[in-house]
Image: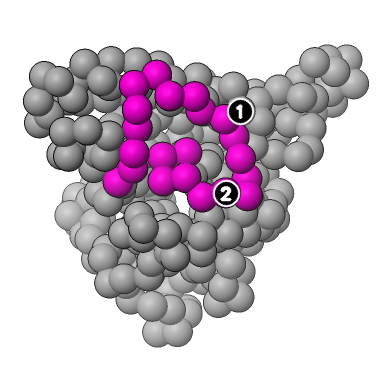
Amino acid sequence: MKKAIAFIFLIPAVFFAQELNAIVTVNFDKLASEDKDRLQNFQQQVQDYLNNTKFTQQNWEGDKIDCSFNVFFVSSDGQTRYSAQVVITSQRPIEGTQKNSLMLSILDNSWSFQYEKNQSMYFNHTDFDPLLSFLDYYAYIIIGFDMDSYYPLGGTDYFNKALDITIRGSSSSYSDGWQLNSASFNRRALVENLLNAKYQQFRQDFFDYHYNGLDLLNNKSTHQQAVENIIKLITDLASVRDKLDSRSVLLKVFFDAKAGEIVEYLKDYSDKSIFETLKKIDPPHISKYDEALKVN
């Protein structure tokens, strides 16, 4: 997705382009050799599915979203059922630079599904499939976060689609991972946070953090305003910290991706108390903020 879309009428071909530029890797080390043989085309099939499926119903006005799915197979029933852990990441370019901003870095450790060697993979937005619906869910999450960074609350439609998948998944025979639970990461909890009114200001600040923050940092005339928009997300979170769930999956996902980036862009900020604030609202990354406090 490009910030500037002035050229879209000159390049109509991008209107109907798929949204993702996904790289899929797989690790079979924990599986038997017979399982590895059955899965020999799995990586390419999943990658093709993610990259060749159009997940949105609207014209895609820009670059595909770079993302990765790193699949670590954990077990197999020796036939067609598998369990895996997956690390999902995505990123978006920072305007006026050669840098990218990490948008997601999620470890999902409860993916169970059925797969037969060389089975067909077709997008179906109405039926739940433990393999494809998992991919669809993360496609919508990736697209939703990307859209939220370019338009205020721009990802809502995609988060709603992801929620629909979790509802169908929670009543399936593969409900693990789709139902609400107390795990540090949960698919259902993430989308419920995203769609909860309590987090609407955070999502607005998320937009400003990227579009009116990171994207403007490289311009001297807008640099100070950009820094202030980054700071605003932090101070707004601090002001409502007592009203938000201390185990919020959305905030975990945000800071897992952004803690290092925030330190990088604020390390020269004159008021170091911002890192004390971050320590309070993001305890899991205290060590990063302590290091930033040591910088003169």
Can you give x and y, in whole percent of width and height, for residue 280 in the image?
Answer: 29, 71
Q: Main secondary structure of the magenta part?
A: loop
Residue at 43% across, 79% down = 244
Q: Nearer the viewer, residue 123 or 88?
A: 123
* Tally of numbered discs: 2
Residue at 22% across, 61% down = 284
Left or right of residue 253: residue 150: right
Q: Nearer the viewer, residue 183 or 278?
A: 183
Specify the quadrant that holds the N terminus. top right
What number is the disc on residue 66? none
Residue at 51% across, 64% down = 167
Left or right of residue 172: residue 96: right
What is the quadrant of residue 185 in the picture? bottom left
What number is the disc on residue 53? 1
Can you give x and y, in whole percent of width and height, for residue 159 in the image?
Answer: 59, 55
* Kind of element beneath mark 1: loop
